[in-house]
Image: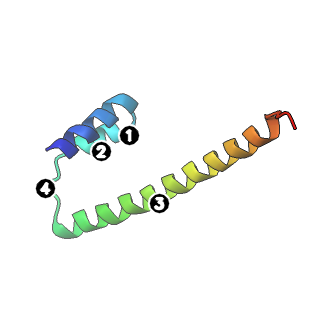
Amino acid sequence: MAMQDDNEALARQNAGPLHGLVREDLDPYSVEDLEARVEALQAEITRTNDALERKKNRRSDADALFSFKDN
């Protein structure tokens, strides 16, 4: 139940599409539907992690460009 509480807290915090996603009743879904959902969510996690890494790299590049260090 703690994981669900964490998910709900994140969804409330962002109040975007995640809000409905983490609160959705999964009982009506078939095994196949749930497997497809997991696959789609895993793909979204990969896509999100890739975007996060690109942003971190851009920030690191910008920090390096604009940091003036005494040599």
**Three-letter amino acid code at disc 2?**
Leu
Q: Secondary structure at mark 4?
A: loop
Instruction: Please tell me which residue is depicted at 21% across the width and 45% down the height of the picture.
Output: 3
- The image quadrant where one finds the C terminus is top right
Sequence-wise, the earlier of marks 2 and 3 is: 2
**Three-letter amino acid code at disc 4?**
Pro
Q: Is residue 59 above or below residue 27?
A: above
Question: Are circles 2 and 3 on residues that touch, CB within 8 Å?
Answer: no
**Three-letter amino acid code at disc 3?**
Thr
Q: How far separated are the C-alphas under marks 2 and 4?
A: 14 Å
Tell me the tag on residue 28.
Answer: 4
**Three-letter amino acid code at disc 1?**
Pro
Tell me the tag on residue 37.
Answer: none
Task: Look at discs 1 and 4 and give the one toward the viewer.
Answer: 1
Residue 29 is situated, as x and y percent measured from the top left of the image, at: 17, 59
Q: Is residue 29 above or below residue 15?
A: below
Mark 1 is surrounded, within 10 Å at the Cα level, by few (under 14), some (14 to 19) or many (20 or more) other residues, namely few
Question: Are circles 1 and 3 on residues that touch, CB within 8 Å?
Answer: no
Sequence-wise, the earlier of marks 4 and 3 is: 4
Sequence-wise, the earlier of marks 2 and 4 is: 2
Sequence-wise, the earlier of marks 1 and 3 is: 1
Tell me the tag on residue 46.
Answer: 3
Q: Would residue 51 be found to the left or right of residue 62 on screen?
A: left
Q: Would residue 50 be found to the left or right of residue 33 on screen?
A: right
Residue 6 is situated, as x and y percent measured from the top left of the image, at: 26, 39
Tell me the tag on residue 21.
Answer: 2
Instruction: Please tell me which residue is depicted at 73% across the width and 38% down the height of the picture.
Output: 63
Residue 28 in sight from this viewpoint: yes
